[in-house]
Image (cartoon, rainbow, N blue to C red):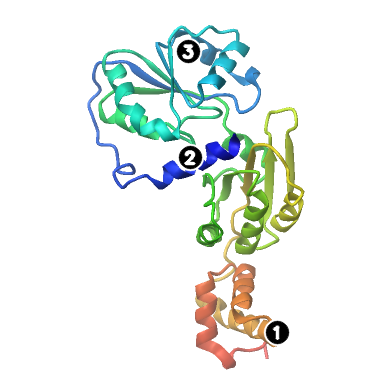
Amino acid sequence: MERAREASRAAARGRATARDTAPVPPAAPGPGGTLTLAAAPIGRPQDASPRLAAALAAAPVVAAEDTHRVRRLASALGVRMTGRVISYWDEVEAARVPPLLAELTAGRDVLLITDAGMPGVSDPGYRLVAAAAAAGIRVTVLPGPSAVTAALAVSGLPSDRFCFEGFPPRGKDGRARRFAELAGEPRTLVFFESRYRLAATLAALASSFGPGRSAVVCRELTKTHEEVRRGTLAELAAWAQTGPLGEITIVVAGAPPRRADPEQAAPEAAAAVAGREREGVPRKAAIAEVARELGLRKREVYDAVLRYGADAPDESGR
């Protein structure tokens, strides 16, 4: 079930067009219903707020990622939903927007809820919110649980600045390119990942970010078998070979501060690469290692090697 839902989300993201990502044009507020984005518990129904229970009971229209799940949630909360419940998941999202917008325009409130967490955050919702905003429909939020902020808070990694990257690309080459782009990101990074690809993703992160980068894997947050595993990326990649189960969130420490200006560090970088090459390390691998150690980009180290070459001092300074 989890793998099918994530595959569907990835396919839907791949079909997004430039129009999907264009800024929403401003619109003057007009008459109509209210679109409410409701955060659903990420594990235990008891984490739902009284406001969510009241909204489920009162909403004329409930658009749910999984209609069976939302009914189970309502039952667990002791709520009887009196409104119409329709499905709203990735594969049908585009088709559902026009009729839901018509409901809102006609003055009926719509409650949008996903399986877990907040609609629009690696879940369906963005298109409806964009369309409602463009039409001048009031959009509000019913806050609640979030796997992103829960994992960030429990990780113990810096949380004053962070970025959420959603699910990494599924393919090996796509992952490598994405992680290479993020290797120098100084903010803490948060990813979602399927348990089926966890080991491969952690290994790819270790390769791009360096095996010693600190990270935390959060599994089944708020549920009975919750686990928070801390370590280096290399250690976590080895642990993931055991095949941990459940919903996964990965939190990775940001890149360390750059040690020096690239121009000033160039002789040291060239010397360090030359030293590794004398030890039999291929140049490409040596450049990657030195870049991580000195907090430089690989291109900056490569340029230093081309510039100084044999004229670079050895690592003792001679």
Up the image or down, 172 lies above or below 216; here it is below
Give the percent coordinates (x, y) of residue 246.
68, 37
How many marks the image carries: the answer is 3
Q: Of the residues under marks 3 and 2, which one precedes in the sequence?
A: 2
Up the image or down, 236 lies above or below 124; here it is below
| Residue located 59% across and 24% down the image | 41
Q: Secondary structure at mark 1?
A: loop
Q: Is residue 230 visible?
A: yes
Give the percent coordinates (x, y) of residue 90.
44, 35
Q: Of the residues under marks 3 and 1, which one precedes in the sequence?
A: 3
Residue named by callout 3: 55
Q: Of the residues under marks 1 and 2, which one precedes in the sequence?
A: 2
Label 1 neighbourhood size at 10 Å, few (<14), some (14-19), many (20+)? few
Q: Nearer the viewer, residue 124 or 46?
A: 124
Q: CA distance from mark 3 to mark 2?
A: 26 Å
Q: Secondary structure at mark 2?
A: helix
Say which amino acid is labelled 1.
Answer: Gly
Q: As drawn, is 37 to the left or to the right of 240?
A: left
Q: Nearer the viewer, residue 269 or 276?
A: 276
Q: CA distance from mark 1 to mark 2?
A: 44 Å
Say which amino acid is labelled 2.
Answer: Arg
| Residue located 59% across and 83% down the image | 270
Between disc 1 and disc 2, the foreground one is 2
Residue 9, which numbered label?
Answer: 2
Residue named by callout 1: 280
Say which amino acid is labelled 3.
Answer: Ala
Whether the residues at callouts 3 and 1 have beta carbons within 8 Å, the answer is no
